[in-house]
Amino acid sequence: QIPRLIDYFVGGKQFYLVQEYIDGCTLKQEVKENGIFNETQVKKFLQEILPLLHYIHSQEVIHRDIKPANILRRRIDERLVLIDFGAVKDQVNQATLMGTGQTAFTNFAIGTSGFAPPEQMALRPVYASDIYALGMTCVYLMTGKSPNSFESNPVTGEILWQPHLDISDSFASILQRMLEFSVQYRYQSAQDVLRALNSESSYGILAEGMVTQQKPNLNPNRKSPTSSQESTFLNEPNTALLLPSQRMAAQIQARNKRLTQKKQQNVAGDTEIYDETSLVSGLSATQGAPSTMIYEPVSNQSKFSPPPAASKWNENTLKTAYMKGKRDFPDCELSGLNLQNFDFSGCNFYESRLSNSNFQNCDLTEANFGRARLTEVNFRNAQLVKAYLSNANLERADLRGANLRDSCLNRANLRGVNLCGANLTRAIVSDEQLAMAKMNWRTIRPNGKRKLWCFWF
């Protein structure tokens, strides 16, 4: 999926590459001829192009100019081919310019405006720069519009692509992470993006897998259930129009209701059995409650009883899961928990509900609270170094004495937040946001300085 380099030469002060000819059309041409991509098509595109990007990065090559016009769909096998490797040309151009008196930077290919991230435009590209360009390519495929045609945030300069896309919240969060302006909060590798996509796909499969067929009655002594007692999700209220988290919660609630009915009926010979490996950590990670798949009762089987499905995490189960190595708790119900003095560094609480929870003195270094509900949370004296709080709702939260060095508070709601004594050195936050918060002379601002206060007597 990379054109072979056949030869190269210099002529007329120009450098030329002779490469394998790829018969096909670019994705830019494909969008113009066939129309824009949908979410499923873009996910398929990412699943194919990301392993290729991982390979070229493993060879210590940064492409620097990923865009729809530089991705071909080969006609013979419909596979994607990445062309126009600017990194190769950059190195040779700089070599040929030596002694000419011409500055190498004037010929340094920095990519295409709109697709290239800010660090690349500043001539400091990293591997994550290609991740940003790939994210913008996805936006183009779903809109057919150049990134430069979108409005931008007048304060940060970020391109406001979100209003132009009609996609699922889970995929939007992946794109948001790919397109973070600050490179430290962006996905750092193609493998990171692939893992996020696979986690989202696994969650979708699990949600659909909860809809099961009715098993045959293998117990001759068992009464035939009525239509209202059928142990199948097909007879439950239609949940197709709900969000994934709402749909899963409704299915689990319906399952628990059926179990309660069966216990009340006390049908002889009925024993609930379950497969303890049927729902692995993927469900509990994405849904916020450990659970198991319940199968149709079968007689003369082992006498297991299913564990109760928790409606939400509590202090003990959350801490235990963390100590066993679990780090992902996105879209979880964690409101009102007392978690003070615990080490949750590196945890992912993306889009979780944590209102009124107590994280006082906690180590939350590099924790992900993106789009989380953090109203009235106690973060007093917490370590939030390099924490990701973009788009989080922190209204009336207590962050007195918190260490927020290098954290990302981009577009976070700081209305009524107490930042007295907090350290915001190099934090990504606007003056407009800080104007809504409470600060005092001990608050260290993003520039590393405290605000001077004058007292007149």
Image: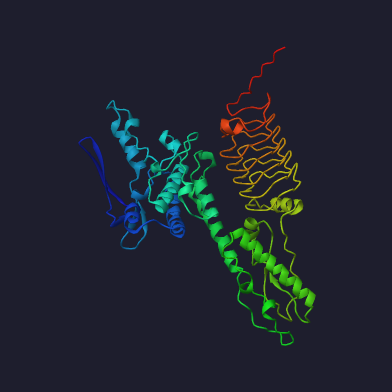
Residue 106 percent across, percent down from the top left = 32, 31
Task: From the viewer's side, name the closer residue of 21 and 398.
Answer: 398
Give the side of residue 199 with respect to residue 383, left or right: left
**Can you tell which quarter of the image residue 439 is in?**
top right
Q: Is residue 304 visible?
A: no
Residue 88 percent across, percent down from the top left = 34, 42
Q: Is residue 398 visible?
A: yes
Which residue is at 79% across, 75% downward? 264
Which residue is at 52% across, 54% downward? 171
**Can you tell which quarter of the image residue 87 is in?**
top left
Location of the C terminus by quadrant is top right
Which residue is at 43% across, 56% downward? 45
Where is 90 relative to 52, above or below? above
Residue 169 percent across, percent down from the top left = 54, 53
Q: How many circles with numbers are drawn on the protein? A: 0
Task: From the viewer's side, name the closer residue of 359 and 12.
Answer: 359
Q: How is the image coloured?
A: rainbow
Residue 310 percent across, percent down from the top left = 73, 60
Location of the N terminus by quadrant is bottom left
Residue farthest left in this picture: 12
Residue farthest bottom in this picture: 220
